[in-house]
Image (cartoon, helix red, strand yellow):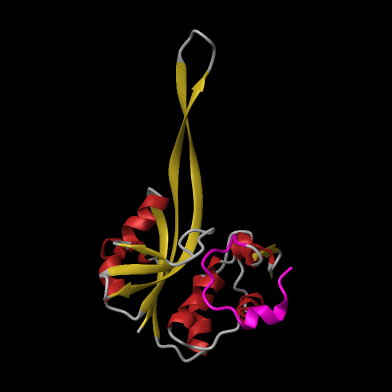
Amino acid sequence: MIEMDMLEELTYIYGQSNKPIDSIPLGKYTVGYAGCGPIAVHNTLCYLDVQTDFQEVIEYFEDNRGLVLGGLVGTRSKICAKYLKSKDIEIDYIRHAWRYQKKLDEVVKSKRGVIVQYAGFSPIERLEDEHEGEGSSINTSFRIGGHYIATRYNEVDDNFIMYNAYSNDTSERMTDSVRDHINSMYRFVFDMSYILII
């Protein structure tokens, strides 16, 4: 278990599944399971150079009904926005932003940063042998899930920096397109929110 005083000294959190971050309690679950929302808030405060205490972020989510079903299905994006406002960060909050996902890269370029919450699903095809000699069939099932990332535009290299892009990352991840990154995770995105840092 991570010592609580270590949480005050954390800088960026690159991957929520990495030890010792993964075992920090969050509601009925752990940061490794459902912590991408609080991590996105924490990482945003880091790149804005605002002092942050990750334990305080966690407690805010727990105390303000920020966990959906105790964390079973993640966290509420409006609590991310509310916490940033409580730190005097000027934001715009766009719920149901999936309609604007084609313009996501333009949006990130025009702001100091963006927290993107997305949920979607992708078909997973597996070739299965039914019976020897009778050929095979394709069984399609679906991978469904969601995630939050903190991202910002890097003018120097003309790319985007993403934090906690994958749960086991050990550093920030660079990409030419945040939109393409999300589409590589889920073929069909059915929910998306933006918290725009002005």
Q: Is residue 195 left or right of residue 2?
A: left
- The span picked out in magenta is 1-18
Within the magenta stretch, is there residue 166?
A: no
| One can see residue 88 in this view | yes
Relative vertical location of residue 17 with respect to residue 160 in this rendering, above or below? above
Residue pictured at 62% horizontal, 61% vertical: 32
Look at the magenta stretch and give its main secondary structure.
loop
Relative vertical location of residue 118 with respect to residue 52 in this rendering, above or below? above
| One can see residue 94 in this view | no
Residue pictured at 51% horizontal, 82% vertical: 82
Residue pictured at 43% horizontal, 45% vertical: 122
Q: Is residue 5 left or right of residue 124?
A: right
**Residue most toward the bottom?**
88
Relative vertical location of residue 73 with respect to residue 83 in this rendering, above or below? above
Pick the front one: 51 or 37:
51
Within the magenta stretch, is there residue 5?
A: yes
